[in-house]
Image (tube, coloured by chain):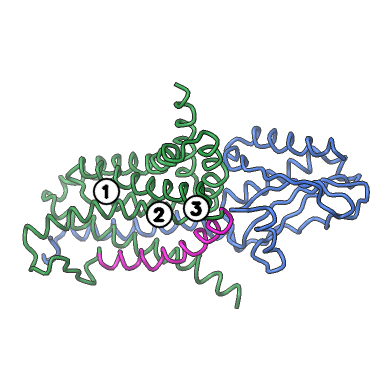
Chain colours: A green, B blue
Amino acid sequence: MEWLLPLTSALWLGILTSISPCPLASNIAAISYMTREVDRPHRVFLSGVLYSLGRSISYVCLGALIAESLLSIPEVAFFLQSRMNQMLGPILILAGVILLGWIKVNLTGITPSERSASRLRSLGSLGSLLLGVLFALSFCPVSAGLFFGSLIPLSIQQNAPFSLPLAYGVGTGLPVMVFALAMACGVRGLNKIFQHTSRLEAWLRKLTGWIFLLVGFYFVYFHIAVPLLRRG
Amino acid sequence: MHFNRAPGRSDKYLASFGIFSSVLVLALSLWGCSANGAEPSPAPAKQPGSNSAGQVVVTYFHTTFRCPTCRKLEAYSRETVENDFAKQIKENKIVFRTVNLEEAENEHFIKDYKLYTKSLIVSLQENGKEIRWKNLPDIWRLVHSREKFEEYVQSEIEAYLKDL
């Protein structure tokens, strides 16, 4: 049972990271992305699991690179806090534009059919994974403080470079997943008004697109425009 | 996919819902992580090194972008030092200061103290020379409990004061 305490600590550090106001904007984007497929709670759940897994992948890789001394903590920490957040804005805006259908992405090369629609769906789940990877790498001060300051020393001390960053990643995704499931249950009640689930889904997709756009502009404003203005 | 339909009445309701939610999200985001940067940071404390007998220098390192948790860290740190060590401050045995890492002349602190984010560093200095220092990484974990935070910072500073 000795392994249980560090594992719970890592999970708790992840939850602490996630519930602080700092990653609020990216959490909102993740929740709206997961809630899109509202008539299929199992898909919302799957999306949440993949999102958490994506976050874990980033943390495990970073942890491994630091443990092997391939990366120095100060350099990678400040790089991720500044550059990743700068990149995140334009990426989210692009994702929002695609979700809103302003740019048509034809991934299959065939005209839309049931088959490509189902492919798009599986791509949607993959999207959750990618979103997890991306958001985990966009460190804010709180996540940097807890990850580099508490989790990495803990996993080195416990000689658990894989399981503890994994548990931390799950912890950072857990509140987001629970919230997405609760939202999905709540929004499903709206079905009665819409009578047709597909309409609701189409609107939720648009809403997700708008949220991605707004969160994207938020990141561009605070991580690109404000520093530029200050420098100017 | 269901995008090429004529908008129905219920769509209008959802459109309003969408706009309302978007505004709400933006407002929440702004409240959550932002505009704090516009506020001026507190005046930095006087520079250390003037006490030849030695001094404990407590420094809160920050960047230009401030988040709500970071402000809390700074306020708790400052209050702990000012409330619990008022006597030592008067005697010039303790100095609390804030340093912006994004100002060119302060960038070297990132390497000196191996910093990875906003941090609280306790340092023992004699005749302006640094004898030893310590990063207090648990401030991030304890910021949710003011009491524990204060206890932690207080005990770490006391450990350094003993060596004066």
Q: CA distance from mark 2 to mark 1?
A: 17 Å
Quadrant of the rendered image containing residue A110: bottom left
Front-most of residues A204 and A105: A105
The answer to whether marks 3 and 1 mark residues whose Cβ atoms lie closer than 8 Å is no
Number of on-image labels: 3
**A83 falls in the magenta region:** yes
Query: Same chain, marks 3 and 1?
Result: no
Give me the chain letter of mark 1: A
Query: Same chain, marks 3 and 2?
Result: no
Give me the chain letter of mark 3: B
Crowd rating for badge 1 (residues with CA inside 10 Å; few <14, some 14–19, many 20+): many
Front-most of residues A118 and B127: B127
Left/right placement of residue B27 relative to residue A46 reads: right
Please name the residue that numbered disc 2 is placed on: A135
Which residue is painted at 51% across and 54% down in the image?
A70
Please name the residue that numbered disc 3 is placed on: B32
Query: Quadrant location of the N terminus of chain B?
Result: bottom left
**SS of the residue at dot 1?**
helix
Which residue is painted at 40% across and 50% down in the image?
A58
Label at residue A35: 1
Left/right placement of residue A85 relative to residue A54 reads: right
Which amino acid type is marked by label 1?
Answer: Thr
Left/right placement of residue B123 relative to residue B164 reads: left
Left/right placement of residue A180 relative to residue B106 reads: left
Give me the chain letter of mark 2: A
What range is drawn magenta here? A73-98
Q: CA distance from mark 3 to mark 1?
A: 21 Å
Q: Position of residue A74 (x, y in %)?
A: 59, 56
Q: Position of residue A95 (x, y in %)?
A: 30, 64
| Vertical order, B7 against B92 (above or below) | below
**SS of the residue at dot 2?**
helix
| Vertical order, B143 against A97 (above or below) | above
